[in-house]
Amino acid sequence: MYILNGMGYGMYGSVWGFLLNILIILIIVGAVVMLLNRSGYSAAPGNERLVKIEKDIEDIKKTVEEIKSKLEEI
């Protein structure tokens, strides 16, 4: 974290930077899942790992939305 005049600046020093990092991670994971789906992987019974990853992505999206709503309340 970079400190300038006692104020925290930089992508890692604030709540917005944290949310930006989570958003970037979600975009990357979503792109990977989309590419896997296009290449022939589907939610068939043999692909439990892919189904688990998709559920985890949905859970992460819900968590980010909850964090955003709590920040808006503040």
Image (cartoon, helix red, strand yellow):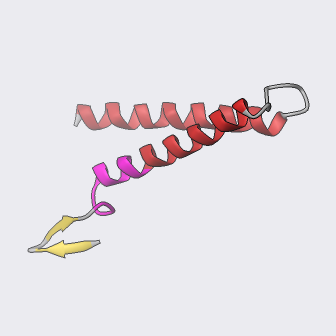
In the picture, measured across the screen, residue 6 lies left or right of residue 32, that is left
**Can you tell which quarter of the image residue 9 is in?**
bottom left
Picture layout, residue 58 above or below residue 1: above
Residue 43 in picture, x, y percent from top left: 79, 26
For this view, does 40 lie left or right of residue 14? Answer: right
Q: How many marks?
A: 0
Magenta stretch secondary structure, dominant: helix
User: Which corner quadrant of the image does residue 29 belong to?
Assistant: top right
Q: Which of the image's four quarters has the C terminus?
A: top left
Q: Is residue 10 above or below residue 66?
A: below
| Residue shown at the point (29%, 71%) measured from the top left | 1
Residue sitting at x 79%, y 32%? 41
In the rendered image, residue 37 lying in the magenta stretch gets the answer no
Q: Residue at x 54, y 38 (%)?
A: 60
Which residue is located at x 32 percent, y 54 percent?
17
Q: Which of 10 and 33 lies nearest the eye of the viewer?
A: 33
Residue farthest to the front, as pictured = 39
Question: Is 68 situated above or below 13?
Answer: above
Q: Position of residue 35 (x, y in %)?
A: 66, 37
Closer to us: 73 or 58: 58
Give how far across and how far down residue 5 sits, in percent: 8, 74
Choose top left, top right, bottom left or bottom right for residue 53: top right
Q: Specify whether 44 is left or right of 1.
A: right
Judge by depth and name the residue closer to the eye, 71 or 30: 30
Look at the image and give the residue range highlighted in magenta.
11-21
Viewed as shown, does residue 45 lie left or right of 35? right
- Which residue occupies the extreme right position in the image? 46
